[in-house]
Image: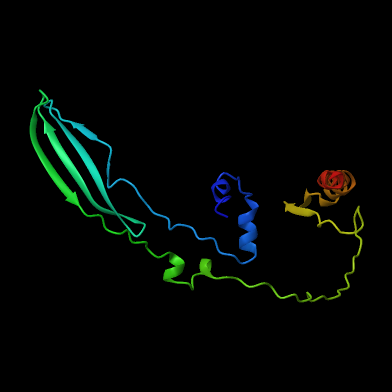
């Protein structure tokens, strides 16, 4: 084994070996993962120009610590530098802020699960719909009549009996000429409604 061991590292291993080992219940020891990174990150620079020609430059540095593969933002240090119009430093202040863990507010359903939009609806029961038989009778109507016209209206003037409204003659024209035309127009309108459905 000592003679062939130097040549084993140069051999390209088949990647199927790993899946075969795991499928047969074998263990593959891997090194524990580690998290590394910078201890501080420089944030963007914010410049505010004032009317008198001076300006304020703010720089924030975010500091981090790594412990047990957990990265924590410990402090945020913001430096504010006030520059005169000739770019000389007028003043400088530093403010350190410790970030707090962001609290996640519970949702509406977590606050009150009895709300309608939080209720899980069940499946409807597979029941037969009730049925009933009804007898419907239809009596066809005569297309051109069967009814009667109102009586004529008369008016008495100085002893004379004068016909004011001749309903008999008006009904004759309505029944004889107008009613068939209206029925034909209604049948044509109904046909226009049905034809698109028949085409589809």
Q: Residue 34 appears in which quarter of the rendering?
A: bottom left
Name the residue: 65% across, 53% down: 16
Foreground residue, 124 or 194?
Answer: 124
Q: Residue 132 appears in which quarter of the rendering?
A: bottom right
* Residue 159 seen by the camera: no
Tally the marks.
0
The N terminus is located in which quarter? bottom right
The location of residue 121, given as percent across then percent down, is 60, 71
Q: Residue 86 appears in which quarter of the rendering?
A: top left
Foreground residue, 166 or 184?
Answer: 184
Q: Image height check: is 114 above or below 191?
A: below
Q: Image height check: is 86 above or below 135?
A: above
| In this rendering, position of residue 89 left or right of residue 57 | left
Name the residue: 63% across, 73% down: 122
The C terminus is located in which quarter? top right
Foreground residue, 115 or 135?
Answer: 115
| In this rendering, position of residue 51 left or right of residue 60 | left
The location of residue 117, given as percent across then percent down, is 52, 66
The furthest residue to the front: 3
Q: Image height check: is 116 above or below 86?
A: below
The location of residue 96, given as percent across then percent down, is 17, 50
Foreground residue, 125 or 59?
Answer: 59
Name the residue: 37% across, 63% down: 105
| In this rendering, position of residue 93 left or right of residue 48 | left
The furthest residue to the top: 86
* Residue 60 seen by the camera: yes
The furthest residue to the left: 90
């Amino acid at each position: 084994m000592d003679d062939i061991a130097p040549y084993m590292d140069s051999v390209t291993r088949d990647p199927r070996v790993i899946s075969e080992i795991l499928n047969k219940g074998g263990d593959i020891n891997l090194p524990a993962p580690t998290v590394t990174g910078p201890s501080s990150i420089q944030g963007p620079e914010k410049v505010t120009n004032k009317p008198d020609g001076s300006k304020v430059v703010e720089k924030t540095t975010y500091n981090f610590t790594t412990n047990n593969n957990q990265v924590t933002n410990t402090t945020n240090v913001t430096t504010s530098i006030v520059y005169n119009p000739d770019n000389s430093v007028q003043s400088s202040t530093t403010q350190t802020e410790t970030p707090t863990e962001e609290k996640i507010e519970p949702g509406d359903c977590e606050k009150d699960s009895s709300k309608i939009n939080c209720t899980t609806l069940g499946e409807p029961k597979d029941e037969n719909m009730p049925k009933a038989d009804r007898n419907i009778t239809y009596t066809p109507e005569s297309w051109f009549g069967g009814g009667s016209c109102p009586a004529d209206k008369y008016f008495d003037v100085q002893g004379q009996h004068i016909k004011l409204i001749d309903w008999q003659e008006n009904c004759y024209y309505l029944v004889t000429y107008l009613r068939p035309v209206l029925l034909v127009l209604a049948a044509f309108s109904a046909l226009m409604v049905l034809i698109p459905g028949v085409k589809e």
